[in-house]
Image (cartoon, rainbow, N blue to C red):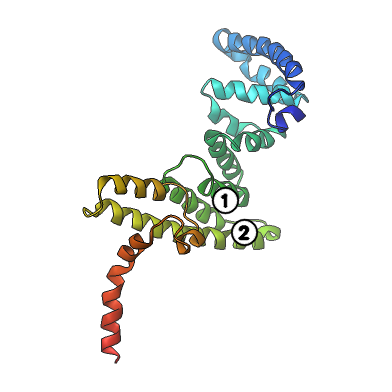
Amino acid sequence: MSYLVDGMPEGDPRRAFYEKRLGSYDLVFAILDTVDKNAPQLRESAYAEIYEADDEVFQSSFFDWLFSRGEAQKLLDIEVPGIVAYLQRKAATSLKHADLLWQYFSKRESFYEAACVLRDLATSDFDLLLDKRIEYLSRARSFCNCFCPIGKRQAMNDLLQRVQEEMDVALIQNDVLARITADKRISETKMKDLVSQINGNLVPMSDVCANKMQLHFVFILFFLPFLSLIRSFYLQNS
């Protein structure tokens, strides 16, 4: 199991032993496949034996097998100790597993854990467009307003504050994106460059203030409509 936890590093001497075990597991999965096709009435009892197994590597391989068969949603119904650790490990590099992880927590009303996963997704390096990141933050904010045990209330409030701050920045970023794509004065080449920078990872406010993304003129465009309001307010109160 330590080989899986360590990320299955290349050249690791444990790999040969791991692959040998996988060969044995493949025989079991071939039998399960036969049961599914020819004796579906035995399916539940066969799967129950797997869930009760104390071999974490086997269970992990079984979860991979279900996933490879397009039966990933069945992972949400599995109640074994190793399923959360499996999803957490896979979520580090697989968006589909990460989505399953927050859904797994949500289904069991573990809203704080679900919100944490969603926030991590929104700020992750996965190849996600801005609107998807905003969707994740919105879901996380909703979960932060759900019931949680008293012992987690402060942590939930802290998480809600962070999520809200990131949502505020993401919405400004989204408004900037909309203004850029609607501005006919920007050349096609510059447009593609700006959109590629904005329509993806959330922009840290520190980066914006330091102009690391060279968006100073874009923010001028964004705040320009407010200048007339400020001027009117000043004239009315002068």
* Residue behind mark 2: 156
Measuring from the top left, give residue 205's x and y in whole percent.
49, 61
Measuring from the top left, give residue 70's x and y in whole percent.
51, 23
Residue 238 against residue 32 in the figure, above or below: below
Q: Nearer the viewer, residue 84 or 51?
A: 84
Q: Are marks 1 and 2 in contact (CB under 8 Å)?
A: yes
What amino acid type should be assigned to the residue bearing mark 1?
Ala
Q: Is residue 83 left or right of residue 199?
A: right
Quadrant holding the N terminus: top right
Q: Residue at x 57, y 48 (%)?
A: 120
In what element is the residue under mark 2?
helix
Q: Is residue 212 left or right of residue 23?
A: left
Measuring from the top left, give residue 194's x and y in whole percent.
35, 50
Q: Is residue 212 left or right of residue 154?
A: left
Q: Residues within 10 Å of mark 2 (few under 14, many from 20)?
A: many
* First along the sequence among labels 1 and 2: 1
Residue 132 against residue 13 in the figure, above or below: below
* Residue behind mark 1: 115
Residue 180 against residue 73 in the figure, above or below: below
Q: Is residue 1 visible?
A: no
Q: Residues within 10 Å of mark 1 (few under 14, many from 20)?
A: many
Q: Residue at x 69, y 36 (%)?
A: 85
Q: Is residue 222 left or right of residue 204?
A: left
Q: Is residue 15 visible?
A: yes
Q: Residue at x 26, y 45 (%)?
A: 188
